[in-house]
Image: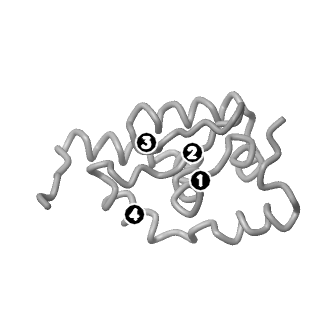
Amino acid sequence: MEKTYLTVEEAAQALKLLGDKNRLSIMRYVSVDECCVCELVELLDISQPAMSQHLRKLKDAKLVNEKRKGHWVFYSINKEHPGYTMVQGVLASLPNGKEDLEELSNNNMRIICD
């Protein structure tokens, strides 16, 4: 399998997106497990419209995948993105967020979409 490289511009764009603390946190959570918009709103304590804007930017850059389940939308990290290894390197230096997702689960709040 041939390794795909990012251009400097593509790498800079991905890193610019990850330079925002909310988008970096989103990537941290969706790298652990797919998450619904409502779960991410709860985890980051930001408004749903603000969350949607962050997710749109990540989706437009193809850093996250979107999957519909009924009327809910779930996001996961795009492992096929050419910058996946770079993103994983950045995320590896952070707590992975698994404990936060487990706490959400323990509080029966993993899926709170209405």
Which residue sits at x=32%, y=39%?
A: 13
Residue under label 4 = 88
Cβ–Cβ below 8 Å for labels 4 and 1?
Answer: no
Task: Indicate which disc residue 34 carries.
Answer: 1
| First in sequence: mark 4 vs mark 1 | 1
Query: Left or right: where does residue 28 sit relative to residue 51?
Result: left
Coordinates of residue 105 in the picture (x, y in percent): 79, 63
Which residue sits at x=63%, y=66%?
A: 97
Q: CA distance from mark 1 to mark 2?
A: 5 Å
| First in sequence: mark 3 vs mark 2 | 3
Q: Which mark is in front, 1 or 3?
A: 1
Query: Left or right: where does residue 107 sit relative to residue 52?
Result: right
Element at badge 4? helix
Closest to the observer: 102 or 23? 102
| First in sequence: mark 4 vs mark 3 | 3
Element at badge 2? strand
Closest to the observer: 105 or 27? 105
Q: Where, by quadrant of the figure, is residue 36 drawn? A: top right
Quick check: 111 above or below 62?
below
Q: Which mark is in front, 4 or 2?
A: 2
Dot 2 amino acid type? Tyr
Which residue ends up furthest to the right in the rendered image? Answer: 107
Residue under label 3 = 17
Cβ–Cβ below 8 Å for labels 1 and 2?
Answer: yes
Task: Indicate which disc residue 95 carries.
Answer: none
Dot 3 amino acid type? Leu
Closest to the observer: 20 or 75? 75
Q: Which mark is in front, 4 or 1?
A: 1
